[in-house]
Amino acid sequence: DQQVKQNSPSLSVQEGRISILNCDYTNSMFDYFLWYKKYPAEGPTFLISISSIKDKNEDGRFTVFLNKSAKHLSLHIVPSQPGDSAVYFCAASGNQFYFGTGTSLTVIP
Amino acid sequence: EAGVTQFPSHSVIEKGQTVTLRCDPISGHDNLYWYRRVMGKEIKFLLHFVKESKQDESGMPNNRFLAERTGGTYSTLKVQPAELEDSGVYFCASSQAPGVPGELFFGEGSRLTVL
């Protein structure tokens, strides 16, 4: 019973364009949301987060949007760069961290 | 400062055998977590230690899995006897303060293949 869902297993984007990764969750009690980035043979690394009291958080090329009523968040990367190619995991924090299945992003030069 | 380290990076064993995975958290991190990712699926919570105590072990699949953290430093996760469905990547993570966003640091994972 997955509480955090990433319905797109993969995404391809041209360099310089915007990448939009989506995530849905089921538990309205989650109070913090995070995105992790994972390269092959490495562990996930923290990218950006957002509190449930906000609807947007921006850090350089990365912006996370939260729509609480829809229980949906998204990660925008603009402009996308080839080095952004990785698997991105959405996570939600309640009494523990719950992760999605990941979206593999490929940025084409 | 060293990050979270895990050993072995890859283990291949036969069904019925035993495997022990080890995790060394970042020094000073009281919180240690074990997660597992089966191919293509989510990173799934297994358990959480605060120092040497098990805070939450609700994600442990069954009693073939045993986690310990003697002395509150490194942790081991033993699978005995291993089954085919135990194959996956086991991640360890640590944090200084529980639930603080962005402060969950992951190791590189231990890939377990059960034949």
Image (cartoon, coloured by chain):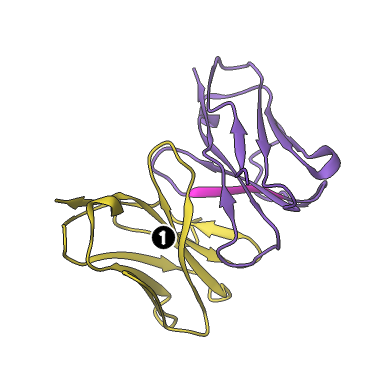
Q: Residue at x 38, y 39 (%)?
A: A40
Residue at mark 1: A5
- The residue nearer to you, when weighing B53 against B87, is B53
Residue located farthest toward the right when viewing the structure as drawn: B71
Q: Residue at x 46, y 49 (%)?
A: B42
The yellow one among the chains is A
Residue A54 on image: x %, y %: 47, 84
- The residue nearer to you, when weighing A65 against B114, is A65
- Measured along the vertical axis of the image, is residue A104 above or below residue A97? above
Prevailing secondary structure of the magenta residues = strand
The purple one among the chains is B
- Measured along the vertical axis of the image, is residue B78 above or below residue B44? above
User: What is the span of residues highlighted in magenta in the rendered image?
Assistant: B43-48
Q: Is residue B32 in the magenta section? A: no
Residue located farthest toward the front when viewing the structure as drawn: B1
Residue A50 on image: x %, y %: 48, 74
